[in-house]
């Protein structure tokens, strides 16, 4: 089994970014921290034989794990989209 990376490089806020821009970076940092925490739990479950599969469900656009024979969504594209909903590209580009 490939080793899962347990942490990510901290995101840097580009120079000149203001309040909402900085809030986006903080929000993305929290999302990444949550994903890495979940991946660590998945790795532990795989090692202990609890999880039998990790897949990407193309229909629901979600990463899923099979735990004790039951597929469970870990994170979906929609979930990430909702978490970042307060921000638009126009806001980031100051338009």
Image: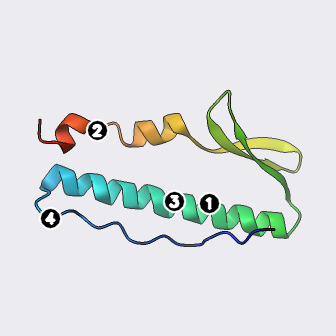
Q: Secondary structure at mark 4?
A: loop
Using the numbered discs, state the Cα–Cα distance from disc 2 to disc 1 in whole angstroms.
24 Å
Q: Earlier in the sequence, mark 2 or mark 1?
A: 1
CB-based contact (under 8 Å), mark 2 and mark 1:
no
Disc assigned to residue 86: 2
**Circle 3/circle 2 CB separation < 8 Å:** no
**Foreground pick, 89 / 29:** 89
Nearer the N terminus, badge 2 or badge 4? 4
Farthest top residue in view = 59
Q: Secondary structure at mark 1?
A: helix
The quadrant in which residue 2 appears is: bottom right
> Which residue is painted at 50% across and 39% down in the image?
79
Q: Which residue in the structure is indicated by mark 1?
A: 38
Q: Label 3 vs label 2: CA separation?
A: 19 Å
Viewer-proximal residue among 94 and 78? 94
Circle 4 crowding by C-alpha within 10 Å: few under 14, some 14–19, many from 20: few
Q: Which mark is residue 15?
A: 4
The answer to whether mark 1 and mark 4 are in CB contact below 8 A is no
């Amino acid at each position: 089994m490939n080793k899962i990376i347990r942490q990510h490089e901290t995101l840097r806020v580009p120079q000149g970014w203001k309040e909402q821009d900085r809030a986006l970076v903080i929000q993305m940092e929290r999302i990444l921290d949550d994903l890495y925490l979940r991946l660590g739990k998945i790795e532990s479950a795989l090692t202990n034989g609890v999880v039998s599969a990790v897949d990407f469900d193309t229909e629901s656009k979600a990463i899923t794990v099979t735990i004790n024979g039951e597929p469970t969504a870990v994170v979906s594209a929609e979930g990430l989209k909702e978490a970042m909903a307060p921000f638009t590209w126009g806001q980031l580009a100051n338009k």
